[in-house]
Image (tube, grey):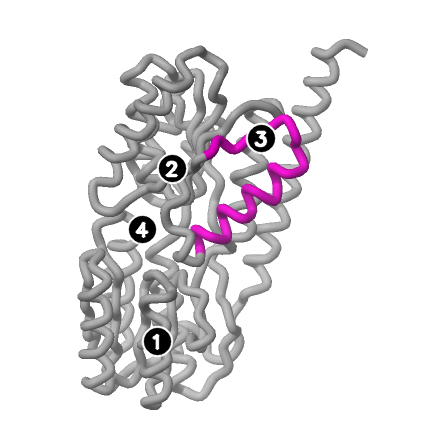
Amino acid sequence: MSNNSNYGLQRRDLLKIAALAGATAAGVSAISAQPGLAADELSLKGKRIGISAAGTDHFFDLQAYNAQIDEVKKLGGEPIAVDAGRNDGKLVSQLQTLIAQKPDAIVQLLGTLTVIDPWLKKARDAGIPVLTIDVGSVNSLNNSTSDNWGIGKDLALQLVSDIGGEGKVVVFNGFYGVTPCAIRYDQLVNVVKYFPKVELVKPELRDVIPNTVQDAFTQITAILNRYPEKGSIKAIWSAWDIPQLGATQALAAAGRTEIKTYGVDGSPEVLQLVADPKSPAAADVAQQPAELGRTAIRNVARILAGQPVPRETYVPALLANKTNVEEITKKLGIG
């Protein structure tokens, strides 16, 4: 059998695996149906709910933050919403302030675990129920999240399939202390180890906040200078899609659109690039941040009503690629 035939079989096999992985992820999400009170029976009347966000400068963060505020009001409660603006010192301070105000519950949206976990514990010790969004803390009664194991696996399988199971991949890995980013990265590594011809370029790049797009643009421009030959780099991966945006812009500016980019979140500007057949943005896993925010607040209402909730509640994520991106954006209501 020719090498070309082997390549074709490998690619078809990878696509089958990716399709199966997607179906499995959907199954995991499907079994997270909530016990107890139905959504229309929930109430937060007379309750004060603290909502702490690490920041709201990203599409995902802002959508989840605003949805929590709206859902607390819809259920008759009073939201106490605070935004740390991506400043860890301010994040600690706002958690201290919330604990002192003794709300009926606190929901933490994102944040580096080593920074926030001592304060989530203090809230629990003070008798305040703590819930989280995208934070894997032992001090959280419930974490509303996407299935980040499935996200990481599905995105990695899509990437490996697209590059034919071989080639160098540039990786942004600046936020391993943030649980979802760590899980997605670990899943990339887990998939790649079964494809010995795929190489993660070392040293890995570190994405930053703020100025994420410009910084990613600068770092990728430098990488392209190190690897000037077409084909020397096959793909660029990031745990969220704002570094992907900067990387994609850098590739377009350098005329290196043969390199494919991958990310997570479903920011509208990135999905637009995925929809462009000429853009190197190959795939973006779209989360549903507003639904995550609403789910967290509904779980607060369940807990305060004495109802059981699971340790984690999964909200389905949707893998958008060149083939299905229009369908995904319509489903998300942003296309």
Amino acid tagged 4: Phe
Amino acid tagged 1: Pro
Residue shown at 26%/78% (left/top)?
49
The image's mark for residue 76 is none
Of mark 4 and mark 1, the one earlier in the sequence is: 4
Residue 142 in the image, given as x and y percentages of width and height: 45, 73
Q: Nearer the viewer, mark 2 or mark 3?
A: 2
The image's mark for residue 60 is 4
Amino acid tagged 2: Leu
Q: Tag 1, which secondary structure?
A: helix
Of mark 2 and mark 3, the one earlier in the sequence is: 3
Q: Residues within 10 Å of mark 2 (few under 14, many from 20)?
A: some
Residue shown at 34%/17% (left/top)?
225
Q: Residues within 10 Å of mark 4 (few under 14, many from 20)?
A: some
What residue would you read off at disc 2? 205
Q: Residues within 10 Å of mark 1 (few under 14, many from 20)?
A: some
Q: Which residues are magenta?
A: 180-202
Q: Tag 4, which secondary structure?
A: helix
1 and 2 marks in contact (CB < 8 Å) = no
327 or 175, nearer to the observer: 175
What residue would you read off at disc 3? 160
Q: How many angstroms separate mark 2 from mark 3 (CA)?
A: 19 Å
Q: How many angstroms separate mark 4 from mark 3 (CA)?
A: 26 Å
3 and 1 marks in contact (CB < 8 Å) = no
Quick check: 192 left or right of 152?
Answer: right
Residue 254 in the image, given as x and y percentages of width and height: 31, 15
| Residue found at the far right of this picture | 1
Q: Quadrant of the N terminus?
A: top right
The image's mark for residue 118 is 1
